[in-house]
Image (tube, helix red, strand yellow):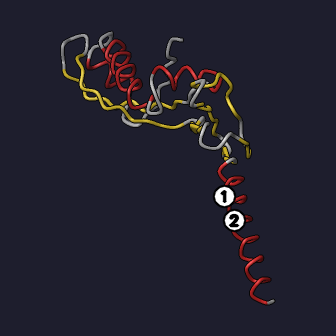
Amino acid sequence: MAAKVFESIGKFGLALAVAEGVVNSALYNVDAGHRAVIFDQFRGVQDIVVGEGTHFLIPWVQKPIIFDCRSRPRNVPVITGSKDLQNVSITLRILFQPVASQLPCIYTSIGEDYDELVLPSITTEILKSVVARFDAGKLITYLPAGQSVLLQLPQ
């Protein structure tokens, strides 16, 4: 009699553990300052950007791709030439963040590591074009070490 009770409790426990595993795989969490894009095995990347919180998805069919949408710094060192053809070593510190509504397009066209692929080339080209407008002497007087300059990137 006791063996049957323990056997039924074991079966119930196993069924409960399997059900908990399925429910747990159907939930995902998006932390504060992050956004998610859903990749569906059948329909591809969804156009909807999911905000912060706990959300449901179809297990083994959908997968969340989490992006950090907070402002993050990045230092880009560049050696370039000034207007009077002097070599100038300068480091540009930029703050960047993705536009949350464009995350599906960013993921499909560039990928998750968009900042590693896009930012170095854009910042290097813009910094070279700005530095080339000035003589080396003017750069030293205009930009003392440690001073910040705000450059707005074109849209």
Query: Which residue is depicted at the point 60% across and 21% down?
Result: 102
Residue 55 in the image: above or below residue 24: above
Residue 33 in the image: above or below residue 99: below
Residue 144 in the image: above or below residue 136: below
Res 115 → quadrant: top left
Q: Position of residue 13 (x, y in %)?
A: 73, 71
Q: Mark 1 — residue?
A: 21
Q: Position of residue 116 (x, y in %)?
A: 39, 31
Query: Which residue is depicted at the point 79% across and 90% down?
Result: 2
Q: Is residue 131 left or right of residue 16?
A: left
Q: Nearer the viewer, residue 21 or 75?
A: 21
Q: Position of residue 34 (x, y in %)?
A: 63, 39
Asked whether disc 1 touches disc 2, contact meaning CB atoms under 8 Å apart, the reply is yes
Kind of element beneath mark 2: helix
- As drawn, the label of residue 17 is 2
**Mark-to-mark CA distance, 1 and 2:** 6 Å
The amino acid type of the residue labelled 1 equals Gly
Kind of element beneath mark 1: helix
Q: Quadrant of the C terminus?
A: top right
Q: Quadrant of the N terminus?
A: bottom right
